[in-house]
Amino acid sequence: MKLQFEGNVSDLRAGIELLAKEIQFVEAQDGIPVLVESSSGTLEVGLDQGKGYIRYGHKHQFFRGLGLFVQHARKGLPFQHRETQQFDTVGPMFDLSRNAVLTLDSFKFMLRKMALMGMNTVMLYMEDTYEIGEEPYFGYMRGRYSPAELREIDDYADQFGIEAFPSIQTLAHLEEFLKWEPVKEYKDTKGALLVGDQKTDQLVERMIDAASAPFRSRKIHIGMDEAEELGRGKYLDLNGFTSRFDIMTAHLDKVLDIVRRRGLKPLMWSDMFLKFASTDGSEHYDTETQIPAEMASRIPKDVDMVYWDYVHTEREDYEKLIAKHRPLGCNLVFAGGVWVFNTFGVNYGLSLNATDIALQVCKEQGIREVYATMWGDDGMESNPYIALYGLQFYAEHAYATGKLDDAQLAERVKFCTGIDADAYLQLKYLDETPGAEPDNRKQSNPSKFLLYQDVLLGLFDKQIEGLDIAQHYAQLEQRIRSSRVQEAELDYIFEVPEKLCGVLKRKSEIGIALKQAYDAKDHDTLRHIAVEVLPQITEAVQALRAAHRTQWLRMFKPFGWEVIDIRYGGIVNRLDTASMRLLDYTEGRIGQIEELEQERLLYSSSNRFNQKGLGWCSYYYRMASPNVFFHVLNPF
């Protein structure tokens, strides 16, 4: 497609040139004339009698408009499109702290997709993955970004009118820094800073300076979520018992003083204040407990509170929880999620339902700033690329007044990402298996625990007994394979899911077959499994690992891949040991296989369809074995 822009596009030029290749157009004198004009805020795009126009209020809206123009003009028919942005700020939060640190090229790729979607912000969640000059152990061997790299990300984002800003931790969630012996002076507990200490205050000041300096934005997210262990380690030894609320508010005052003196605008997670107000001091989503006036009066009002909620699918829950925040008197921001957490796939069933309701309520309640978080819990086997459908969902909601049109959403997804919407949605079935609740509302993650569980120990075998999980993965493998388009730029993101299905169709139920054959003293079946089946699983695992390695090194810095590599090695080695044990038994060298003598118990509950649906496990080491991976005498 040939286009000829008319009007002042000097400030847009760099972004136009970057997106020209992305959506395949060229600028030419004989191209379709497109008049570019600023407007009061409404985005208007159209084509009539061979002439086009893009009228926009903010820089980022132009690039959404450019994408909409090319998308519709390709059809060769006149059109008019008008929309008003419903949120002032919308964009993703990339988790850059759970091993998967996006390369600069990968980050830029995501920014181009965001620009086409019309997003205008990106939050970089960095616990210790940015450099602090006087702290060599901060982010050591973790793929941390240099100041130059962060400036390059910021410069690239700015070309599209996207505001990039840091999200750091100034209280808890600092396990990966505090694990180092040379920095023990900063440590209260395993992950929380020793607040009230002068050296800690100086560290926090350096954190804020180092994280904020590379960015144009004056915004900074100071974290402070999930700090339940605050004041219960070294702080307790030094100061005696002090309420967590008193400790946290005193520390918050210090952090905000640092931020104010630098002219920064702070945000923080709100969950700890909700927990302090709850009956037992720990419930984040208690819709009945109200924040007392005395507590609210002690919380500064010049920090934006970020209410995060990834799980609710009922309007009433969001309405109550938003109302619960109101006594704080702070500007309220919302953070939902695209569920790539603790899985190889994306829980689109839960993500889209929760997002749809949450954003509807946010619009009604006057919340003007929303984020889509993509956490990488427990090492990040997944990736933000397969969450692009979810990001598009957020973007379309941000420009829609009513319910989203599925067909229009699918058309936008295909245009902006090059991948069919249905191909993305197939990935939810990596975890939405037989036995899971509809839309996987309870976040079951069998794609992970069935891969990592040991075939001789069968920790999750009772969970899946009788559910025909192997057949589910065999069918899903075929559906993913048939949906792939080799020439598509992003086709490679389906290689790992396809090969994972190739493993799980063989491995998911093999432990059940082993136990049944062993109990029946069926030596022929046991020998067949040892000689034929387990080697086939090993071969499939090795193919999966190779695909996963290629994908990781294409998307992320290498730091952190060693963790996944070790996990794959564990699977292969345990399959080898299982083969040896089976042959030793069937050939009479041992009288029993003790692992198969053990009764199989449910992993999660006495009721298989319990509060976690099919089953959920948060940590690899608990999936792989019930035995000790590490032992900490003092967890603080």
Image (cartoon, helix red, strand yellow):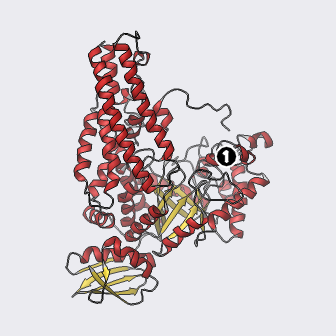
User: Relative to 161, does residue 350 appear above or below in the rendering?
Assistant: above
User: Quadrant of residue 30 in the image?
Assistant: bottom left
Where is 28 relative to 268, above or below? Answer: below
Position of 579 with respect to 323 (left or right) is left
Q: Is residue 214 left or right of residue 493?
A: right
- Residue sitting nearer the eye, 268 or 458: 458
The quarter of the image holding the N terminus is bottom left
Secondary structure, mark 1, is: helix
- At which x and y percent is residue 330? 60, 63
Residue 432 place in picture, x, y as percent = 33, 42
At label 1, which amino acid type do we have?
Leu
Indicate the position of residue 377 as horizontal and vertical percent values. Answer: 50, 46
Measuring 55% from the left and 31% from the top, which residue is drawn there? Answer: 629
Depicted 536 relative to depicted 18: above or below: above
x 28%, y 54%: residue: 423
Residue 253 can be seen, yes or no: no
